[in-house]
Amino acid sequence: MTDSSNTTRHVMTLDLEGDPRGIAAYRRHHRRIWPEVRDSLLRVGVLRMDIYQLERRLVMVMDTKEGFDLKRSFAAHVASHPRCAEWEELMKTFQRAPPGARPGQLWTPMESIFHLERRASAATGPPGRRSRPRGGR
């Protein structure tokens, strides 16, 4: 999904392995992301990244700069520093593919099925309709 500010939003999901201690370790790692990983993700074009959890299911919402190519940029991230490659390999030990993933795919893109956004001007209605002030004729 692309928005008007020249950014692209990627929403992806994956599942964690069922071990409660592994899930707790995954959360601990993300509370203290390694500086090399943070710097690399920002350098390849990630502007914002949020990961949400519901039991074993994770959802990542990632906003990226214009022209960001997920596969190419992620490969550049992993290759940018040995600690980045180490981080990604470590994270894979906690992860498993969600339903609907392609073979070998962990983080799996989700399909947007609904979008709601406040319009820039409250007086702007649907096309072809004019807004009328309250109490007017």
Image: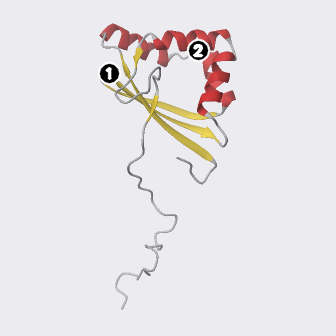
Q: Which mark is residue 56?
A: 1
SS at circle 1: loop
Gap between marks 1 and 2, in whole Å? 23 Å
Three-letter code, disc 1: Arg
Q: Which mark is residue 34?
A: 2
Residue sitting at 53 percent across and 10 percent down? 89
Residue sitting at 56 percent across and 12 percent down? 87
State which quadrant residue 130 falls in.
bottom left
Q: Is residue 121 above or below residue 54?
A: below
Residue sitting at 62 percent across and 51 percent down? 5
Q: How is the image coloured?
A: secondary structure
SS at circle 2: loop
Q: Nearer the viewer, residue 125 or 1?
A: 1
Crowd class of label 1 (few under 14; some 14 to 19; many from 20; radius 10 Å): some
Instruction: Name the spot of residue 44 as percent of width and height, x first.
Output: 67, 29
Q: On the rendered image, what quadrant is the C terminus found in?
A: bottom left
Q: Nearer the viewer, mark 1 or mark 2?
A: 1
Instruction: Name the spot of residue 43 as percent of width and height, x first.
Output: 69, 28
Q: Nearer the viewer, residue 9 or 38?
A: 9
State which quadrant residue 111 falls in.
top left
Q: Which mark is residue 83?
A: none
Instruction: Name the spot of residue 101 as percent of width and height, x first.
Output: 41, 28
Three-letter code, disc 2: Trp
Q: Is residue 135 above or below residue 76?
A: below
